[in-house]
């Protein structure tokens, strides 16, 4: 579903610069794993089934959209989800982790120092012994199969986008960069029967949700080229100025902005970690006159359940 995104800015600014902004409602897809979550898990779960794994182990924080989605969909694929959770577990679990347990998942708390060590931590070594027949998925589903899922998602988005005349730029948030890489790797098929050519591939404008997000540039390019060796990486731009203090930070100014956007778009809910920062940052870049892009499509990546960390 694609519709116009009404921004709080003066509409005359959009008119003067001949800019239009629409939004792809990924948050309305796949009830159990909305937005990019299902697409990053899809091929990983298929690989787990092919390997006859009994468990799927992944990483995330206590409010992780990725873990929440994994818990929701793992059972249907015949595997038990196991979560390595960043930070020691508290006596009262977050709603996200309670949902994970209710879906049949198993929680393993990880000290932050071990979590940072990733696959080299002693905890991972322990879990390898406990679950020798497990399939491992990186945090956020960010591996080659996760990128492949987002690459396929790009085709679905483009099918709807072309029905509305196409867009010169797709705008998306980033945590690990896997979704951005999949979108960047996508290029319209060329051929006699195709009306599109390689140059019609949209530019990808990325707004990281964390400090230092400009550093994702290398990873996004690497993942995209692995998926599609002919990817034109020059189509990628990263704007890292709108993280609002860091990952998952929600200052009053951003919260007020979310309310203003909702008032103009009553059927739209923005998640506080990713998409809200994209919308805010995009508006600021338009006001500052920094964009040469004219027809923008913002990709809503879901994550609404993340609100439980703020309420």
Image (spheres, grey):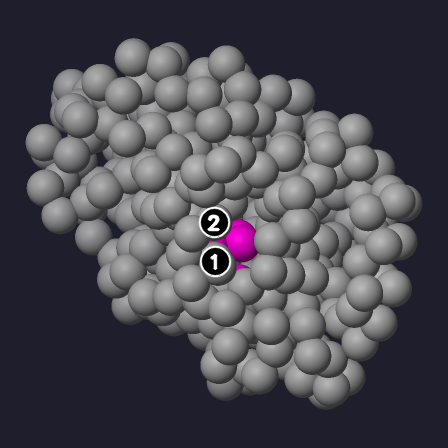
Q: From where the camera sits, is residue 151 visible?
A: no
Q: Quadrant of residue 83?
A: bottom right
Where's residue 172, x and y in %?
47, 42
Look at the numbered disc 2 and give the secondary structure of its residue. Answer: helix
Horizontal side of residue 72 vs 85, given as left or right: left
Q: Is residue 68 magenta?
A: yes
Where's residue 300, x and y in %?
36, 48
The residue depicted at 13 percent of the width and 48 percent of the height is 267
Q: Nearer the viewer, residue 64 or 142?
A: 64
Q: Nearer the viewer, residue 51 or 92?
A: 92
Q: Is residue 172 magenta?
A: no
Are the residues tagged 1 and 2 within 8 Å (C-beta)?
A: yes
Where's residue 129, x and y in %?
87, 64
The residue depicted at 25 percent of the width and 57 percent of the height is 2
- Crowd rating for badge 1 (residues with CA inside 10 Å; few <14, some 14–19, many 20+): many
Where's residue 72, x and y in %?
44, 66
Location of the C terminus by quadrant is top left
Question: Which residue matches tag 2?
Answer: 97
Question: Magenta segment, principal secondary structure?
Answer: helix
The residue depicted at 17 percent of the width and 26 percent of the height is 259
The stretch in magenta equals 66-70
Q: Quadrant of residue 118?
A: top right
Q: From where the camera sits, is residue 255 visible?
A: yes
- Crowd rating for badge 2 (residues with CA inside 10 Å; few <14, some 14–19, many 20+): many
Horizontal side of residue 273 vs 204, given as left or right: left
Horizontal side of residue 21 vs 10, given as left or right: right
Q: CA distance from mark 1 to mark 2?
A: 5 Å
Q: Which mark is residue 100?
A: 1
Location of the N terminus by quadrant is bottom left
Look at the numbered disc 1 and give the secondary structure of its residue. Answer: helix
């Amino acid at each position: 579903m694609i519709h116009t995104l009404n921004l709080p800015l003066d509409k005359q600014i959009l008119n003067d610069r001949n800019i239009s902004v629409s939004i792809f409602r990924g948050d309305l897809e796949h009830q159990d794993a909305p937005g990019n979550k299902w697409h990053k898990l899809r091929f990983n779960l298929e690989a787990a089934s092919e390997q006859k794994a009994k468990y799927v182990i992944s990483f995330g924080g206590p409010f992780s959209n990725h873990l929440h989605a994994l818990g929701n969909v793992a059972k249907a694929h015949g595997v038990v989800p196991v979560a390595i959770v960043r930070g020691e577990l508290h006596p009262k679990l977050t709603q996200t982790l309670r949902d994970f347990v209710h879906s049949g998942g198993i929680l393993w708390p990880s000290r932050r120092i071990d979590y940072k060590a990733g696959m080299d931590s002693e905890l991972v070594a322990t879990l390898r012994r406990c679950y020798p027949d497990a399939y491992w998925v990186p945090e956020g589903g960010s591996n080659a199969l996760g990128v492949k899922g987002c690459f396929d998602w790009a085709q679905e988005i483009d099918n709807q986008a072309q029905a509305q005349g196409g867009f010169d730029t797709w705008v998306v948030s980033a945590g690990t960069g896997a979704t951005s890489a999949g979108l960047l790797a996508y290029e319209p098929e060329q051929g006699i029967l195709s009306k599109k050519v390689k140059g019609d591939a949209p530019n990808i404008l990325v707004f990281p949700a964390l400090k230092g997000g400009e550093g994702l540039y290398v990873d996004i390019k690497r993942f995209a080229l692995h998926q599609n060796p002919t990817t034109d990486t020059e189509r990628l731009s990263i704007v890292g100025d709108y993280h609002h203090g860091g990952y998952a930070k929600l200052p009053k100014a951003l919260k007020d902005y979310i309310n203003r956007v909702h008032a103009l778009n009553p059927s739209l809910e923005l998640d506080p970690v990713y998409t809200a920062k994209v919308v805010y940052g995009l508006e600021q870049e338009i006001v500052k006159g920094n964009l040469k892009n004219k027809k923008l499509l913002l990709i809503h990546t879901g994550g609404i359940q993340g609100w439980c960390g703020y309420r």
